[in-house]
Amino acid sequence: MSQTSGQTSGEATERTVDERTARKVAEEARDAEWRLPSFGKQLFLGDFRLDLVHPHPRPDEAAAQRGERFLARLKEFCATRIDPARIEREARIPDEVIDGLRELGALGMKIPERYGGLGLSQLYYGRALMVVGSVNPALAALLSAHQSIGVPQPIKLFGTAEQKETWLPRCARQISAFLLTEPDVGSDPARLHATAVPDGDDYVLDGVKLWTTNGVVADLVVVMARVPESEGHRGGISAFVVDMDSPGITVENRNAFMGLRGIENGVTRFHQVRVPKANLIGAEGAGLKVALTTLNTGRLSLPAVCAASAKWATKIAREWSRERVQWGRPIGRHEAIAKKVAFIAATSYALEAMHDLSGQLADDERNDIRIEAALAKLWSSEMSCRVVDELVQIRGGRGFETAESLAARGERGVPAEQLLRDLRINRIFEGSTEIMHLLIAREAVDTHLSVAGDIIDPEASRGRKARAVARAGGFYARWLPTLVTGAGQRPGAYGEFGPLAKHLRYVERASRKLARSTFYAAGRWQGRLEYKQGFLGRMVDIGAELFAMSAVCVRAHADGQSGGTPLAGETATLPGSSAVRLADAFCRQARVRVEELFDGLWRNTDALDSKLAKQVLDGEFTWLEEGVLDPSIPGPWIAEAEPGPSKRDNVHRRIPASAAHRPATGA
């Protein structure tokens, strides 16, 4: 019989996991092999492999035609059938919109045609998310949570032939979700509470999952749960496809957020839910590997939405900065605002360039893109927030005012503040900025850790450490000389890029400098480097800026070579000289940021900040908190209030009636 573990966060029995065990779980889940070349990995090693991304990869003709036909239909639907203000006002996506997207085939964009999907490439899937995301980002969240990380992607990657035949046709018509997070388990999966206990031909699933995007309306979900180790069962965190019609599933709350008001995100409880063994994805214990591999390309949905938001912000910034007059001139003619407009336009071009390059690299399947996808997600989520924040500043009071309020008093209802709220989650979705820094840093220093090996292993014997030192000495004797000089120091290098060549030479030099800095840090801190998160974060941010500069230069060169026709096949032409001017401006801005980051590697307040934070946590500054009230603490009026609706009354589920009316069986 199964063990019931469906507690809420307050009831949960703490799963104690020490740091070494947590690290071991994470290491076993990551792919330790680099079977394919990686532009990002080599960039961090001081090896600027421009040949891996230049000439800019392009979609094949069939994929492009298929993608363009779908985009045309999708744009018409979004422009004529969707009222974004209604989604924001009612905090839900209307049923008819979801039905319309289903009829268009939007639920099956990434599903192969043989299983009833559209078979779009990653590039055109991203372009489709840009279209719906520009209307309302909650729509993009619905589609990407279903296809980027929901049931279709892990089944495509790890499913058996039978599982693909069973689930993919359903996914082309039905909504799915991905359930990993729990009330007290976020980025540390070693502490996962949910269990799947073998019982005959089934597993019995118990547990609670939090922040289940699409979970409120999903027909199918991927659930991560721990299989207990036993005779005949390897055990470990495993991935299962679960039909939401199964008895024992209760959606207990529809969560509300500062942005993405139309998102269907909730709390889902599994109580004694029987899941056939045929629903196990991959092997027992392979759940985290399934999740991480899925996210390698799944993360690319966020750069698509970020790029769309920046493109729209560019349009609004241009229009308003030309229309609004102060002191006898349009505000865009004043330097303070002009700098913001230039930043928005240049960064918008870079966001789209990074998305398109990463998406096409994923389609080509000739490169390992785990670092590139992670860098794209990290950089895009951070920079798009800065772009839209600047848009709000340019708009002034109208940027802070809601679109509904603007329209009510006769002005154009520009939802700038809504977009700022909607975008904010992207710095948290699918790995927060802080977690992405650590994840990318781990991959970036993989070579150093592999070389160091027993040198930094506290449990290694003195003999093993001595042998490791000898091996490391041989590696660094060969590698370090390659960081002294390179193409970036030759004036004529990358000449085919014209005025952008100087920026690529800078990227090459900065790549070698970054690698040298990492080597110095590894020598200085050795095994303690993983705790130097300030250094690692800046190191990753430098790599992200260098990747963005590379993507922009390659894209601008390709735009010029293609006679001004954008790579994604848009109808408007883009003069090559305009692309080069945008690319040049972006690279100049990025170089300033890179130099500041390099300076911050060694001149910072990291140690002081850590010491101060410890004192804050120890309660030394509680006097600082006096003189204000805490609005999160209920007042006495709460007890006097009439009882309101239960959490379950807030839930609305658009699923078949047979499922919607099943009895709640939660603990």
Image (cartoon, grey):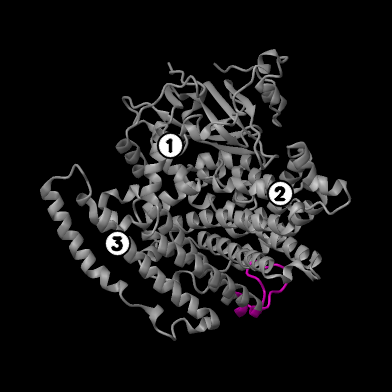
Under mark 1, the amino acid is Val
Under mark 2, the amino acid is Glu
Viewer can see residue 439: yes
Q: Nearer the viewer, residue 157 or 79?
A: 79
| Residue range corresponding to the magenta coloring | 559-577
- The dot on residue 417 is 2
Quarter holding the C terminus is top right
Q: Earlier in the sequence, mark 2 or mark 1?
A: 2
Q: Which residue is mark 1?
A: 616
Marks 2 and 3: CB-CB under 8 Å? no
Residue 165: x and y in percent read: 56, 41
Q: In the image, 41: left or right of 223?
A: left
Q: Which residue is mark 3?
A: 519
SS assignment at label 3: helix
Q: Earlier in the sequence, mark 3 or mark 1?
A: 3
Q: Is residue 136 above or below residue 91?
A: below
Residue depicted at 70% across the width and 22% down the height: 649
Magenta highlight on residue 561? yes
- Outermost left residue: 463
SS assignment at label 1: helix
- Outermost bottom residue: 492
